[in-house]
Amino acid sequence: MQHYFTSRPQVASRPREVRALLRGRTWAFLTDRGVFGHKGVDAGTRLLIDTMVVRPGDDVLDLGCGYGPVGIVAATLAQDGRVVMIDINERAVALAAENARRHGLANVEVMQGDGLELLAGREFDVIATNPPIRAGREALRRLFHDARDHLRDQGRFYFVARTAQGAKTLAAAVDEIIGNVQEQAKGGGYRVYVAVKDV
């Protein structure tokens, strides 16, 4: 089986629309095979969305955006800010852009890339991710280092992980790299953490 964190899915396209109740509102998203959570917004992503704090003026990065539920909800919260959504998967990027268009969001930028090389020199108040656990430990550590380098002082890094897939170990790694990790929520076998970058 090909992973969703490859650049070009080989599985045949079969677009569909899914609905999800997030932060008290029902959302519709176009999704497809070959992208993460294509059958519907998964429990971990739901918990992340419902937990993350996004202020009206925040600049937000949805890291590994998939078809865009985290970034799209963030864009409605950060009306006076900007949201960048990035993913390595070209099909996911096309879907995220279409979903942003469908929701009439003018403060969203979607791009395809592996890691954050395309964002050199840019910093964010919030970075949120449902990290690709199956990519391996080294890939995840690189992701966390990249996130730290793109956070503003006092910027917040939100991430979610399955308890049974080493959420606490992941949190310890983020605490080592970014610092100040705190558990924000847990449920459905998932935990959401935030790390705040020191000045």
Image: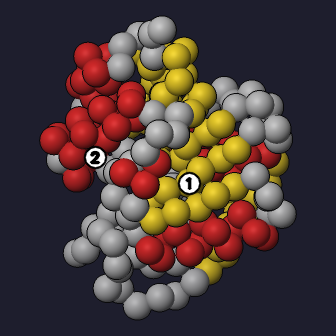
Residue located beneath label 2 in the image: 133
Q: CA distance from mark 2 to mark 1?
A: 19 Å
Residue 51 showing in the rendered view: no
Residue 124 showing in the rendered view: yes
Q: Residues within 10 Å of mark 2 (few under 14, many from 20)?
A: some
Number of numbered tags placed on the structure image: 2
- Tell me: residue 20, above or below residue 137: below
Q: Which residue is the extreme one toward the bottom?
A: 12
- Please tell me whether mark 2 or mark 1 is closer to you in this view: 1
Residue 180 image label: none
- The image position of residue 112, as x and y in percent, is 45, 65
Residue at disc 1, secondary structure: strand
Looking at marks 2 and 1 on the same chain, the residue that comes earlier in the sequence is marked by 1
Quarter of the rendering containing residue 140: top left
Residue located beneath label 1 in the image: 85
Quarter of the rendering containing residue 46: top right
Residue type indicated by callout 2 = Ile
Residue plotted at (44% across, 74% down): 90
- Tell me: residue 17, above or below residue 170: below
**Coloring scheme of the render?**
secondary structure
Q: Quadrant of the N terminus?
A: bottom left
Residue type indicated by callout 1 = Met
Q: Residues within 10 Å of mark 1 (few under 14, many from 20)?
A: many
